[in-house]
Each structure stands twice: as C-alpha cells, then as structure tokens.
Image (cartoon, helix red, strand yellow):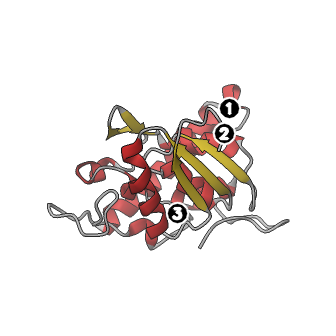
C-alpha cells in the first residue's frame, strides 16, 4: 500500500498517541542491500526495528519543530510522515549497518556516497509538496531511499544516478519492493532525462 492521499482526505498520523503507520514491508529484515536473499551474519529483530523506526519518527517530528524558523514548517504533512514510516530504511543500507538504519544520520553506502539523514529526506519531501501523480526528476538515486519515499507519496519518479554501480541495485531493490512508478537510469542529469 502506498500512502498517497486522495483529494480531500488526510492520512491519519497522530504523533501524540504514538499512532505510527505500520507496514509489514517496513519490518522485513534479512535482505542484503540490492540482493534478494537473507543476510548470512545476523537477522535484526523485527520488534527492535519497529521501536527504532518509531523513535526515529518522533525525532523527525521534534526536528521539524526545532527548525521551523529556517524551514517554515513546524510539522511535516501526515502523508510524508506515513511515507517515512512505511519505507523500510534498513533495506537501503549496507547489511552491516542495519542496526543503525533508523538513527537520524546519513550513512555510507560506498563509493564516497551516503544515504541521506532521514530528517533531511522528510524535509525535502515535505517542501516538494508531492501529490499523487506528481512527476519528479531526482538527480542522485544512491541506494534509492529518497526515491522510495517519493514513490510512497504517489509520485512518478524519474531518477538518475551518476555512479553506475548504484543504478542496477537501486532499480532492482525498488522493483522488488513494489515501487512500479519508478524509473532509474545512469546519468548526471546535465541533459535532462
């Protein structure tokens, strides 16, 4: 299930009640980054991942309040927060970093690149005011985490990655996770799509 809002409808997310959207997909550990088989060295506990994700969502909400003077947003939309809850960040980090997947910081994904800090992903997504059916050109796919968040919001995402070694794994990962409205190619965006 995608979290795109129907016109006039709001996604229910109540941070005070701790009512975070749940997703079995977001809690399916045991996959290698870009692979379809279980990790060989450990499998994170689903409950721990769920609690870590919930803490991260609370921290993102607090960061939004703390940075409202700079961003103009005291809170992010329910749709953005639901998308952040539904996208399983641990699927987009190196398996050895799974235990820190829901820490609010960027993490290395290799080749001098990082997966963005979750707060920044939420902020960029909120500032973009994505609606279902929006068309988004993303430059810099990386592991595909921001791409998945945009797709979760209902956007048709056209994503370009300049570092060729990321393109196929990101494309395969997003397809395996059911993000059908995403296209990933290698390029730097200089000449557009």
Total numbered circles: 3
Q: Quadrant of residue 157?
A: bottom right
Front residue of 135/6: it is 135
- Residue bearing mark 2: 192
Quadrant for the C terminus, please. Answer: top right
Nearer to us: label 3 or label 2: 2
Is 13 above or below relative to 117? Answer: below
Q: Residue furthest front?
A: 191
Left or right position of 132 against 163:
right
Give me the C-alpha separation between circle 2 and circle 1. Answer: 33 Å
Q: Which residue is mark 3?
A: 86
The picture places residue 19, in percent across and down from the top left corner, at: 57, 65
Circle 1 residue: 68
Q: Is residue 87 visible to us here? A: yes
Residue at far top of view: 70
Where 52 sits versus 5, above or below?
above
**What separation in Å lies between label 3 and label 2 (alpha carbons)?**
30 Å
Q: Earlier in the sequence, mark 3 or mark 2?
A: 3
Q: CA distance from mark 3 to mark 1?
A: 24 Å
Image height of 8 relative to 190, above or below: below
Secondary-structure class at tag 3: helix
Front disc: 2 or 1: 2
The residue sitting at 31% across, 63% down in the picture is 35
């Amino acid at each position: 299930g995608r979290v795109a809002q129907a016109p006039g409808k709001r996604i229910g997310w109540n941070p005070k009640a701790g009512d975070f959207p749940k997703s079995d997909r977001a809690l399916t550990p045991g996959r290698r980054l870009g692979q379809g088989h279980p990790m060989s060295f450990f499998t994170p506990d689903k409950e721990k991942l769920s609690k870590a994700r919930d803490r991260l969502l609370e921290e993102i909400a607090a960061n939004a309040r703390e940075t409202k003077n700079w961003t103009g947003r005291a809170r992010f939309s329910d749709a953005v927060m639901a998308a952040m809850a539904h996208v399983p960040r641990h699927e987009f980090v190196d398996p050895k970093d799974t235990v820190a997947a829901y820490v609010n910081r960027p993490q290395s994904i290799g080749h001098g690149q990082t997966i963005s800090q979750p707060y920044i992903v939420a902020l960029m997504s909120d500032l973009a005011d994505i609606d279902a059916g929006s068309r988004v050109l993303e430059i810099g796919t990386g592991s595909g985490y921001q791409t998945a968040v945009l797709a979760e919001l209902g956007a048709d995402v056209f994503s370009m990655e300049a570092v060729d070694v990321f393109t196929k794994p990101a494309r395969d990962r997003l397809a395996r996770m059911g993000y059908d409205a995403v296209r990933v190619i290698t390029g730097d965006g200089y000449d557009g799509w």
